[in-house]
Image: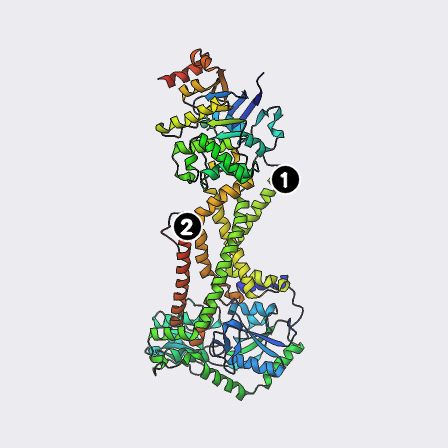
């Protein structure tokens, strides 16, 4: 039986009067790649941010393995659940290498040497080793996102959450980032990816989730969701993308 | 003579009374007679580099000399005590007397009703005449009745009764008073005013170094109705004590002849008559010759002032930045849902404290803060003016820095915080390693600007007797009675200091990879 890393149980989140997540149930198993689809404003980002506890849920539970995350030490938990943002969020006051080392040194208390070795290892994996000493502000969007992925990997998280990792990129840079994520998928890294890249979602995911207005409308294998679509809302959404 | 106006001083006195009850007539019961004066009121008191046989050292700031010094020395000898002269701003004299920092004010001060409430005065030690300084070429030069000045523009020194007596002239254009004689003389020369009210010895000093000006004496009963005697001020409540009686007795023992001879000597020695240069008398020297002479003759006084000003500016900016970093950071920790109850309470208290700190210290003049902090804490910490000055300017700058840092932190994109949180960095780590370095870098121009501001604003600390560049300049100006010339030198020195500071700050900014800023307030 597959091991569940994250289990989301009746999750609720509101901003003021607006109910953004209404009773969301969802889980991520070890080694799985999940794509989360849905139109803008449907609550995808909020779901990921709740899992990482960047937002505090209003109701329901999130379990990390067996433990309710409320009982865990917040920063320790976050280091286990990596996050890659649409807008990269690299530290502007640091170069590429430092971006990848700071979390290891300050949170995981690794030695500088170990942290550097690990940083270079993951930078090589995303094809950014040659840029190790460049200030992060001087990189292109695609390069920044690859460094951001390396930064998250350096923490050796059990699951990595991606929130529209290619949406802020110029079209010619999308491929290089998707390629990196695809390679990670092949290595068996557990990932949940919010994306609008349908072909990529089909190719890389084991499971696809479609969200609308704060609920998960449809869930299944790419085959099931894309070709044997059950719900009207999903059909309408996919229809817009195919034309 | 000069008179205090009720104002900050009385407000301050109130705090003093609450803060420290005056128990004894004298705090220093040792064998020194400590006297406060401005050292910039020729011929009563002035500052000089020359150690004449009447001058008394005032530390690194040179010597103080003049009629008041001679009287003080005579009294000290008769009291069998050692004389110590403390150079203080006019507004600083009363608080210093009240706090026991000085034993007596001998500063050309007139006893009057208002002042009697805070000071016990002896009988007068000099009596003079109230005159008017006018342009020698004007029709006013021949006046002998104050009423002839009706319709004319007349000015007097701020916060003194030189200013209030002007209203005895009917239909006078009472000009806005200025703080110093230097400024008023310039106004007279620039035709902005037609007369300056003055005490005779002071007027004589002014005219000696400004040959284009003259003195108008008034006929019997046609002059100002004013008391022109000056008295020695002792601490309120000391009348009747042994010390008061001793001083009064010593004063009575100085004969009329002796007093007159002191005044003659003071006039003779007063610096405004100056040295002839290359055989040219002072009154015939050009502006730049006078400027050069002042710079040459008084450069040690200016240098001492520069040293103090730089110490204050750098200490104030560096420690102000540290205070600002702490307070600005505290203020920037947002209260979050996920915080424990206690943490929320602590954050609220911290926000409240920082808010209050910034509100009070930005909302009141540093001069007033200096008064309060210095004299309220004086009985507890026994600090000297310079130490107090360094702390006050740091505390004051801290308020501005707190706002600069807070604005800097706010300007950092939220994504930076989220990036740090997402890899498990704590709030403190995020602040320290990610946010603050960027905030400081972004705010470098504003932080540097505080240094420039402090170079200039440190001058306000003269009220507690910090002898900075500005205070030294007023002394030189008040001693030589060449005001434009002295302050021309002062301006050049300040400009030099701020320019050097600007260049250094620009270099630092460049090194930190910040785009060079084109504008900088100087
Ligand atoms: N911090 C916030 N404050 C208020 N409303 C928010 C906040 N974050 C998201 N929302 C609202 O919640 C809804 C869902 O947002 P989001 O989760 O970002 O959707 P998606 O990622 O699917 O586009 C949107 O209507 C958005 O305006
Ligand atoms: Mg989103």
Q: Chain of mark 1?
A: B
The image quadrant where one finds ligand 2 is: top left
Q: Is residue A15 visible?
A: no
Please give the residue where the numbered disc 1 appears in the rendered image: B342
Q: Nearer the viewer, mark 2 or mark 1?
A: 2
> Looking at the picture, does residue B411 appear above or below residue A60?
below
> Residue A103, labelled with which disc?
none
Q: Quadrant of the C terminus of chain A?
A: top left
Residue A75: image location, x then y, percent = 57, 34
Instruction: Please tell me which residue lies in front, B465 or B99.
Output: B465
Residue B460: image location, x then y, percent = 49, 63
Residue A42: image location, x then y, percent = 46, 23
Q: Chain of mark 2?
A: B
Q: Earlier in the sequence, mark 2 or mark 1?
A: 1
Instruction: Please tell me which residue lies in front, B373 or A104.
Output: A104
Numbered disc total: 2
Residue A2: image location, x then y, percent = 57, 18
For disc 2, the neighbor class at 10 Å (few under 14, some 14 to 19, many from 20) is few
> Looking at the picture, does residue B352 appear above or below residue A171?
below
Q: Is residue B107 visible?
A: yes
Q: Which residue is outermost to the bottom?
A: B257
Disc 2/disc 1 C-alpha distance (Å): 42 Å
Q: Residue at x 45, y 70 (%)?
A: B302
Q: Residue at x 56, y 81 (%)?
A: B73
Please give the residue where the numbered disc 2 appears in the rendered image: B511
């Amino acid at each position: 039986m597959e091991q569940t890393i994250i289990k989301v149980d009746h999750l609720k989140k509101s901003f003021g009067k607006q109910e953004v997540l209404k009773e969301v149930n969802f889980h991520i198993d070890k080694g799985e790649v999940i794509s989360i689809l849905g139109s803008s404003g449907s609550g995808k980002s909020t779901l990921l941010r709740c899992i990482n506890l960047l937002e505090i849920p209003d109701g329901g539970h999130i379990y990390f393995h067996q433990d309710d995350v409320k009982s865990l030490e917040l920063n320790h938990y976050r280091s286990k659940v990596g996050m890659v943002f649409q807008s990269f969020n690299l530290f502007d006051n640091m170069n590429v290498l430092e971006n990848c080392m700071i979390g290891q040194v300050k949170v995981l208390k690794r030695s500088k040497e170990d942290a550097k070795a690990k940083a270079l290892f993951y930078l090589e994996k995303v094809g950014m080793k040659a840029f190790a000493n460049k200030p992060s502000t001087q990189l292109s969007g695609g390069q920044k996102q690859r460094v951001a992925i390396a930064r998250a990997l350096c923490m050796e998280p059990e699951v990595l959450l991606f929130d529209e990792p290619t949406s802020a990129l110029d079209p010619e840079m999308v491929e290089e980032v998707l390629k990196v994520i695809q390679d990670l998928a092949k290595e068996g890294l557990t990932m949940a990816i919010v994306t609008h890249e349908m072909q990529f979602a089909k190719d890389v995911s084991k499971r696809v989730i479609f969200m609308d207005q704060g609920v998960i409308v449809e869930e299944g294998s790419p085959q099931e969701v894309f070709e044997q679509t059950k719900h009207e809302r999903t059909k309408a959404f996919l229809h817009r993308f195919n034309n | 003579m000069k008179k205090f106006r009720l104002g900050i001083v009385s407000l301050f006195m109130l705090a003093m009374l609450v803060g420290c009850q005056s128990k004894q007539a004298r705090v220093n019961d040792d064998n020194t007679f400590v006297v406060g004066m401005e050292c910039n009121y020729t011929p009563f008191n002035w500052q000089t580099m020359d150690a004449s046989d009447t001058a008394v050292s005032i530390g690194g700031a040179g010597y103080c000399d003049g009629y008041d010094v001679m009287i003080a020395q005579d009294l000290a000898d008769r009291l069998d005590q050692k004389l110590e002269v403390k150079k203080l701003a006019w507004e600083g004299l009363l608080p210093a007397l009240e706090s026991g920092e000085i034993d007596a004010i001998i500063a050309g001060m007139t006893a009057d009703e208002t002042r009697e409430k805070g000071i016990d005065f002896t009988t007068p030690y000099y009596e003079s005449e109230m005159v008017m300084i006018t342009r020698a070429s004007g029709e006013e030069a021949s006046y002998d009745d104050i009423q002839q000045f009706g319709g004319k523009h007349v000015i007097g020194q701020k916060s003194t009764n030189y200013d209030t007596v002007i209203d005895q002239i009917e239909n006078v254009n009472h000009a806005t008073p200025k703080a110093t004689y230097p400024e008023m003389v310039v106004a007279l020369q620039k035709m902005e005013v037609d007369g300056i009210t003055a005490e005779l010895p002071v007027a004589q000093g002014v005219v000696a170094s400004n040959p284009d000006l003259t003195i108008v004496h008034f006929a019997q009963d046609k002059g100002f109705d004013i008391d022109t005697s000056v008295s020695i001020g002792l601490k309120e409540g000391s009348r009747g004590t042994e010390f008061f009686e001793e001083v009064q007795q010593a004063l009575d023992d100085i004969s009329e002849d002796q007093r007159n001879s002191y005044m003659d000597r003071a006039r003779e020695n007063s610096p405004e008559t100056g040295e002839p240069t290359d055989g040219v008398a002072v009154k015939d020297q050009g502006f730049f010759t006078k400027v050069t002479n002042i710079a040459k003759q008084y450069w040690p006084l200016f240098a001492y002032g520069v040293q103090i000003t730089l110490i204050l500016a750098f200490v104030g900016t560096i420690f102000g930045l540290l205070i600002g970093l702490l307070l600005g950071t505290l203020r920037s920790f947002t209260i979050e849902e996920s915080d424990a109850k206690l943490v929320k309470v602590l954050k609220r208290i911290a926000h409240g404290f920082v808010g209050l700190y910034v509100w009070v210290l930005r909302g009141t003049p540093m001069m007033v803060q200096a008064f309060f902090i210095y004299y309220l804490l004086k009985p507890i910490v026994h600090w000297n003016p310079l130490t107090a000055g360094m702390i006050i300017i740091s505390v004051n700058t801290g308020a501005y820095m707190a706002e600069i840092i807070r604005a800097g932190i706010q300007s950092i994109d939220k994504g930076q915080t989220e990036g740090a949180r997402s890899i498990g960095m704590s709030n403190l780590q995020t602040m320290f390693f990610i946010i603050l370095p960027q905030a400081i870098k972004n705010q470098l121009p504003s932080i540097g600007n505080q240094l420039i501001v402090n170079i200039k604003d440190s001058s306000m600390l003269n009220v507690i007797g910090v002898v900075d560049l500005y205070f030294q300049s007023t002394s030189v100006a008040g001693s030589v009675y060449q005001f434009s010339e002295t302050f021309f030198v002062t301006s050049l020195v300040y400009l030099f200091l701020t320019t050097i500071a600007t260049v250094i700050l620009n270099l630092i900014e460049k090194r930190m990879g910040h785009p060079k800023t084109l504008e900088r307030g100087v």
